[in-house]
Every structure is written in C-alpha cells, then in structure tokens.
Image: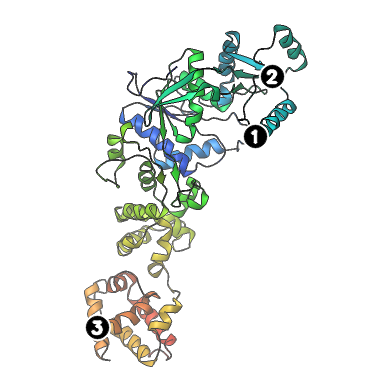
Amino acid sequence: MISPSPDSARPQVRTRFAPSPTGHLHVGVCRTAIFAWALARHHGGRFLLRIEDTDKEREVEGATERIQADLRWLGLEWDEGPDIGGPVGPYIQSERLPIYRKHADRLVAEGKAYRCYCTKERLDAMREAQAAAKLPPGYDRHCRNLSAEERDSLERDCPSSVVRLAMPVEGETSFVDAVRGEITFDNKQLDDFIAIKSDGFPTYNFANIVDDHEMKITHIIRGEEFISSTPRYIVAYDHLGWKAPVMIHVPLVLGPDRKKLSKRHGDTTLQEYAEEGYLPEALVNFLVLLGWSAGEDIEILSREEMVERFTVDRFQKSAAIFDVTKLEWMNGIYIRDLDPEELAQRVRPWLERSGLLPLNPSEEEIAYLVRVLPLVQERIKKLSEAPEKLDIFLKGEIDYDPKAVQKHLRGPVTAELLNRVADALEGVKPFEDPAAVEEAVRKAGEELDATGGKIIHPVRAAVTGRTVGPSLFDAMAMIGKERCQRRLRHAATLAGTPPSAE
C-alpha cells in the first residue's frame, strides 16, 4: 500500500500544531509550529491548534494557557483551536474520547483491530525473552488470533483490555514523503500498536490519525525522527478507509557539535528566550531557516516575505544546526532596525526590573529614554543588555570598572585634567550640543598639553566608568552638565587628589 503523493489534488490547505500540555514550549517544537503556520498562510489555508492531553500523568496545570500565550508571543495566530472553537472541535483530545472509541470499535468489529488482555507481567517477560534472544522488541500478537471462547473467558477475567491495530505481517508499506520521496518499509517491522489504552484514552498515534482525518488536515509536518512510525499511520488510514494527508518530515536540528539538540545547545523554553531579551520576530526568522531555505542566500526576511516564499520544495534533507551565536547576531539586526520609540517600549520591562526606570515612568522619562537609545542601539544584541548599556544615562552615580580606573584614572596629572574639564563644562551653552561639549573638553586638555587619547580616555572613564561605549561627546551631551561635572570631580579623587573648589 502507498500513501498519496504531495502533488495530489486537495481542497483548502489545513495544517495543525498539536503540542502536549506539559509546560512552556521549547524552541525546537516551535519550529514545527512556524512551518505549519507558514504553509497554511502561504496557501491561504487554515492553521489549527490542537491540544494532545491523552497522557494525563505528564500534564501540567495551566500548560494549555501557557502554550497559547507562547504562540501569540511569536505572532502565530490560529484559525481554529480550544479557545476560539471551530467547525471540527472540540480541539482538546480529552474531550474527544467517544470519537476515538467509535472508530476503534469499528476496527475491532471489522477484524482490523483486536482486544489484547495481556498483563503487565506477561509483557515484561516477553520483552526479557526477546532481549535475551537478541530479537527486535515488539508485541508477539499473542491475543490476535484467540478463539471466541478464549476471548469470552478473558473478557470476564481481564476486563481492562487494550485495543491493538492489526498490522500486516507480509509485504511492504510505502509512503511518499514530500521531502525525501517514496519510502518503503517491510511490514515485518510493524508491530500491532495500541490504539486505545486500558483507561479508555487513545494512544498518541491513534488519536493523531483520527483527529487529523476528522479535522480535515491536508499536510502533516513533523521531524524526520518520526519517519519510522509513519508506516503504522498509513496502514491505519487504510484500515479506516481514509486518505492519508501529505507527509512532510523535516530534518533534525543538531547542536554545533552535530549531536542531538539539547538544553546545552539552546533547546530551552520559549519563555527563557523571551526573558533573555530575544525578539519574537528574530526568533521566528531564525527558527524557520532551520531546515528550510528562503532561497538566494536570504537570511533576514520579514514575516510577509517568509509566507510568500514558503513552499514545500524549499525544505532541506540535511540536518540543521542550532547556533545561538547566529541567533544573537540576527536578534541584534532586528533590534537595530527598531524605531527608538518602539525599542523604548521593548526594553522598558528590563529597565523597570533593574530599577533604572520606575514602574510607571513619566512621559518625560520615556522621552529621555527615546533620545538616549540611538546612542547604544548598535551595541545591543539582546534586550536584557539594555540596563548595562543605559545605566550611565539613567543613574545618578555610576560604578567604575576597575580596569578603567587602573588604566585611565591614575596620577595627579589626570586628577588635574579631570577637574579642569569639569570647570570648562560650566560655560558650555547649549550643553545638548555635542560639538560645544567637545570644544570645551579639548581646550581644557590643551592647557595641560593633553590631546587625542590622552584626554578622551580619562574623560570617558570618568564620565561613564568604562573604557568603551557610545560616542563620548554625544553621551556627555545626553548625560547633562551637572552629572558630567559631578562624575569628573569624583573621578579626580580616585586619581589621587581632591577636586578643585567649585
């Protein structure tokens, strides 16, 4: 048997993202959601959100709401789902149990599935024997061909049976993957997998098959690690008399060391990336390029460009590399492209948490932040870096980098220079003019035969507490006269002599 080709004529494209409610989404899973969303949007189709909560032991309270919040933060709005409903709901699997039982019962009645009464003890012994004999693991079909009398007896003695699908034991099963072409499996490799568990809940595999059909899903996007389980799906679709959706198995995502992606490579929750200050639009851009190409060596693309270019033929076969350094670079590009007003709102939570802004900043405080941001915007790669980059503007007193003190704030000559510069700033009008500030600073230095770096470096260290930073005179004009003078005189004391009288 063979699944349909990706080119088969189909109605409106319908894709889905079906996470389990076990917590916040991880970025690796979010890639699948982005692919499914983009494919539906490219074809003018529908993107569905379905919650797969059949594993009650792993379910986390409030996880469904967190998943929805994560997707909305990414900007992935769904057309049908648990919160907004739709024509093929409900969209939470635990609310669909009668649907699964109906289809499972039909398969049992037609002889395409059967009830299995094997106890845990028997199954454990079977697996141990298989391992000892170095046989591949899998159910031995003990209950597949029971007589009617045996079934009746077991039904009375073992009421907590499961339903297994009867897989073919001979021949081959093939399917056409949209990325890799036709793939064929020997049916001897397929075991009779459980469709309905003893607690009445469906297994992940069976629920997926039923839901994708009932919800009219046309394209299934998932990782290539699921290729080996796809023949089961194809057989189940055939048993049920349904047409299988187009199967799209996207490449694995590996770490820079080409090992399976893990937390140490950056496979953490979406929430952690948000808290670190990554922009959702940058994260979507980065993730969509893990296994898919926009063509023409394009790396930065808007959401509209992504949707326009998103076709199945652009998926790659080779593994994608999750490089956090590249994500940080990309995030910096997106930050630099923001208007100062927009950037001010994006960095505001970090500034408020650090105490550099009050929880309810005034219009004047926000306006000042908007004026300051262009001076540091080029240096910010993550929003979480904003407090460190902006504290010289938003704090009254600053902390001095010991390296700056050791390198540029030592000796009586330096102290005298800083005091003279502080004095010279008194006559600068308007102080908001960087050129006027620069002229006063350089003239003060010339009086002590200090030019170039001999004046710039000590003044920068005195005013900002650091050896590097934004344009010195632009920064001083923004910091303001009084704070610059106060910092210069304080740095003079660090250099070894008291400040001059004001």
Q: What's the mark number on residue 161?
A: 2
Instruction: Give x and y (percent) for residue 55.
Output: 61, 31
Instruction: Give x and y (percent) for residue 368.
Output: 34, 62
Mark count: 3
Q: Measure the alpha-carbon separation of dots 3 and 2.
A: 88 Å
Pick the front one: 387 or 341: 387
x 51%, y 20%: residue: 210
Q: Is residue 311 visible?
A: no
Q: Measure the alpha-carbon separation of dots 2 and 1.
A: 20 Å
| Tag 3 residue | 442
Would residue 413 appear left or right of 210 to someone viewing this image?
left
| Tag 1 residue | 57
Q: Amino acid at mark 3?
A: Arg
Secondary structure at numbered mark 1: loop
Mark closest to the chain's N terminus, 2 or 1? 1
Instruction: Give x and y (percent) for residue 292.
Output: 35, 39
Q: Amino acid at mark 2?
A: Ser
Q: Against 294, is 352 above or below?
A: below
x 36%, y 45%: residue: 281
Q: Nearer the viewer, mark 3 or mark 2?
A: 2
